[in-house]
Image (spheres, grey):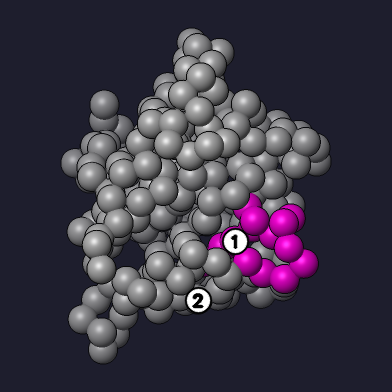
Amino acid sequence: MSHDTSGHGRLILLSLGAGALLTHLPPGDGAEPLRIGYIDEAQRHLLDEPFTGPERERLVRFGYRVVDVDLRRSGFESVLAGVDAVYLSGGDTFALMSGLRRSGADTVIADLVRAGMPFVGLSAGAVVAGPDIEPAALMDDPGMGLDLEDFRGLGLTETVVIPHADGQLPPYPLELIDRTLTEYGDRFTLLPLYDDQALVVDDEGSHVVPSADPID
């Protein structure tokens, strides 16, 4: 599978493991670490305060400079303009898309990526990179996106990632993955992605790469 990505930032779409980041978006030499704008909107409905859990901690451990981007505060656009890459965390796909659309960050992020900024998305963050988030309806709660007029994604790739496709996470058994592929596979280009894989979209096209977390 391949897509035209000319004039387009690299996409690194993760299911769970993030080892691919170290190869395809190295954090730097330590003196000037790569700045990643971290967006946790997919998890904000779970807590009153911004979520700063394992995903964010892993990026810090890898050596990135993590810059929190709060879509619910004015001025997030200037924060995004000052980072080297944008990262959308996992959580609920529909909550994430709702927050992106409500804040206008969907357009801001898409424009930045099309201008060359790398995009990293994990689970829900990977799903929204595609053309439509409807295929996540069996895995996440469409009720979290009741204010959405439609289920359009960011449209950064023609592929809709189906994360956790190896059925290793209890909320997403293989039966659910199979139902998703059967129900939506005739209308969308779906890519089942195992938790130790990533989809990388760059100037050479689209390719699935290993993405297990490194062993400390």
Task: In the rendered view, tell whether residue 106 sits above or below residue 68.
Answer: above
Q: Quadrant of the C terminus?
A: bottom left
Q: Secondary structure at mark 2?
A: strand
Q: Which range of residues does the magenta coloring cover?
A: 38-51
Quarter of the image for residue 117 reads bottom left
Tag 2 residue: 67
Q: Pick the residue in front: 199 or 130.
A: 199
Outermost bottom residue: 31
**Distance from the alpha carbon under mark 1 to that under mark 2:** 11 Å
Rendered location of residue 192, percent (x, y): 39, 28
Residue displayed at 72% across by 33% down: 142
- Of the two numbered discs 1 and 2 in the rendering, the one whose residue sits closer to the viewer: 1
Rendered location of residue 188, percent (x, y): 48, 20
Three-letter code, disc 1: Asp
Q: Main secondary structure of the magenta part?
A: loop
Q: Are marks 1 and 2 in contact (CB under 8 Å)?
A: no
Rendered location of residue 148, percent (x, y): 75, 38
Say which mark, if any, is on residue 40. 1
Residue displayed at 63% across by 66% down: 51
Residue displayed at 50% across by 28% down: 173
154 to the left or right of 115? right
Residue 34 can be seen in this image: no
Residue displayed at 23% across by 42% down: 209
Task: In the rendered view, tell whether residue 146 sits above or below residue 102.
Answer: above
Q: Residues within 10 Å of mark 1 (few under 14, many from 20)?
A: many
Q: Secondary structure at mark 1?
A: loop
Three-letter code, disc 2: Val
